[in-house]
């Protein structure tokens, strides 16, 4: 395990309107406000979207399995923002339901808000963590600067 410490910075309440793309709008917002790291919670409704619902097999690198939402679903989710290779890199997971059906996954590709989607975003300052694609194309957090590694012999 690795960890580092930051501090809460600015706090934003964001309202996405009907038809706005969740990932694109949030990425543009972070770019505009110069947010390089943060954490957010969201709830509302998703009209459509592409979710990664797991790997095809239990091996690395994973081949993602996609599921498509084509009808409005109620949504709760959370995610992180880190500096990426070309600006903010957003990683968001969500649980979405319609009637008695539910789906949980990582939003990738298109994702359209239905009616309203609310986001509470907390900027985290002082982190030197980036999300840059590795040799397998995975965008996992990479610790730069000061961080700690916990091992079995650490007390």
Image (tube, grey):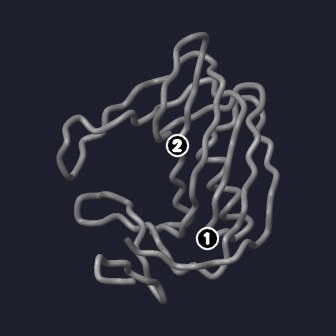
Residue placed at 53% from the left, 30% from the top? 49
Q: Which residue is mark 2?
A: 93
Answer above or below: position of 54 versus 130.
above
Residue projecting furthest to the bottom: 146
Residue placed at 80% from the left, 58% from the top? 12
On-image quarter of the C terminus: bottom left
Answer above or below: position of 152 versus 73.
below
Res 54 → quadrant: top left
Mark 1 / mark 2, whichever is N-terminal = 1
Q: Is residue 94 left or right of residue 133?
A: right
Residue placed at 60% from the left, 15% from the top? 98
Secondary-structure class at tag 1: loop
On-image quarter of the N terminus: bottom left
Residue projecting furthest to the top: 99
Q: Point out residue 86 in the picture as x, y percentages from the top left corner.
A: 49, 67
Q: Point out residue 149 in the picture as x, y percentages from the top left corner.
A: 38, 80
Residue in the foreground of this view, choosing between 15 and 122 = 122
Residue placed at 64% from the left, 59% from the top? 39
Residue in the foreground of this view, choosing between 63 and 122 = 122
Q: Is residue 148 left or right of residue 13?
A: left
Residue in the foreground of this view, choosing between 23 and 10 = 10
Callouts 1 and 2 close, C-beta under 8 Å: no
Secondary-structure class at tag 2: strand
| Other-residue count near label 1 (Cα within 10 Å), few / some / many at <14 / 14–19 / ≥20 | many
Q: Which residue is mark 1?
A: 36
| Other-residue count near label 2 (Cα within 10 Å), few / some / many at <14 / 14–19 / ≥20 | many
**Disc number placed over residue 134 in the picture, else none:** none
Q: Point out residue 99 in the picture as x, y percentages from the top left corner.
A: 61, 10
Marks 1 and 2, how far apart in space? 19 Å
């Amino acid at each position: 395990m690795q960890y580092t410490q930051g501090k809460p910075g600015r706090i934003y309440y964001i309202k996405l309107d009907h038809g706005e793309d969740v990932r694109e709008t949030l990425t543009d917002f972070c770019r505009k406000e110069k947010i390089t790291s943060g954490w957010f919670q969201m709830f509302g409704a998703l009209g459509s979207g592409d979710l990664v619902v797991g790997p095809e097999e239990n091996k690395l690198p994973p081949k993602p399995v996609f599921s498509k939402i084509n009808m409005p679903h109620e949504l709760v989710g959370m995610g992180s923002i880190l500096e990426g290779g070309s600006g903010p890199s957003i990683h968001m997971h969500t649980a979405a339901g319609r009637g008695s059906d539910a789906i949980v996954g990582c939003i990738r590709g298109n994702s359209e808000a239905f009616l309203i989607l609310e986001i509470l975003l907390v900027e985290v300052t002082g982190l030197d963590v980036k999300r840059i694609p590795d040799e397998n194309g995975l965008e996992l957090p990479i610790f730069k600067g000061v961080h700690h590694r916990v091992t079995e012999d650490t007390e």
